Image (cartoon, rainbow, N blue to C red):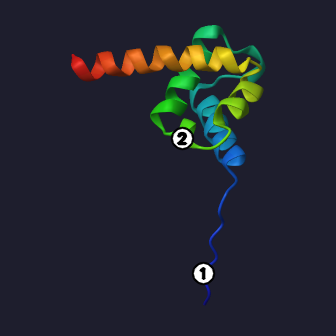
């Protein structure tokens, strides 16, 4: 039998991760608080989602934020993660 490999488009892959986080946390996308959106960005960052092309725009659209907001959240994530590593 021939194996089929499905390569997912980065947009769908990132959205799938975000939907999984929403489900796991019991959150609804349209009612997310600022803190929840920051946590979502941190989870995506930790999962390497921002290594994919166009990720910032995809996440911004999904979370109804601007791209600069996502970059600000990412700055916070990087600080938080480096603090965890150093402690």
Q: Is residue 23 above or below residue 3?
A: above
Kindly report the distance in space between the C-alpha atoms of the residues bearing marks 1 and 2.
27 Å
Packing grade of label 2 (10 A; few <14, some 14-19, many >=20) is: few
What is the total number of numbered labels drawn onto the structure image?
A: 2
Give the farthest residue toward the left: 87
- The residue under label 1 is 3
Packing grade of label 1 (10 A; few <14, some 14-19, many >=20) is: few
Disc nearer the start of the sequence (1/2):
1
**Front-most of 68 and 13?**
68
Q: Which image quarter is the C terminus in?
A: top left
Q: Residue at x 59, y 32 (%)?
A: 21
Where does the image place residue 31, in percent across and percent down from the top left?
Answer: 74, 14
Q: Is residue 72 above or below residue 40?
A: above
Where does the image place residue 47, in percent across and percent down from the top left?
Answer: 48, 38
- The residue under label 2 is 51
Q: Secondary structure at mark 1?
A: loop
The quadrant where residue 57 appears: top right
Q: Which of the numbered marks, if any, corresponds to residue 48?
A: none
Where does the image place residue 39, in percent across and percent down from the top left?
Answer: 54, 19
Choose mark 1 or mark 2, whichever is in front. Answer: 2
């Amino acid at each position: 039998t021939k194996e089929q490999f499905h390569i997912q488009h980065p947009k769908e892959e990132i959205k799938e991760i975000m939907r999984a986080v929403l489900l796991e946390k019991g959150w609804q996308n349209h009612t997310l608080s600022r803190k929840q959106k920051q946590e979502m960005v941190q989870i995506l960052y930790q999962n390497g989602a921002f290594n994919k092309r166009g990720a910032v725009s995809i996440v911004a659209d999904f979370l109804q934020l601007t791209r600069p907001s996502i970059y600000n959240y990412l700055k916070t994530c990087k600080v938080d993660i480096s603090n965890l590593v150093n402690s």
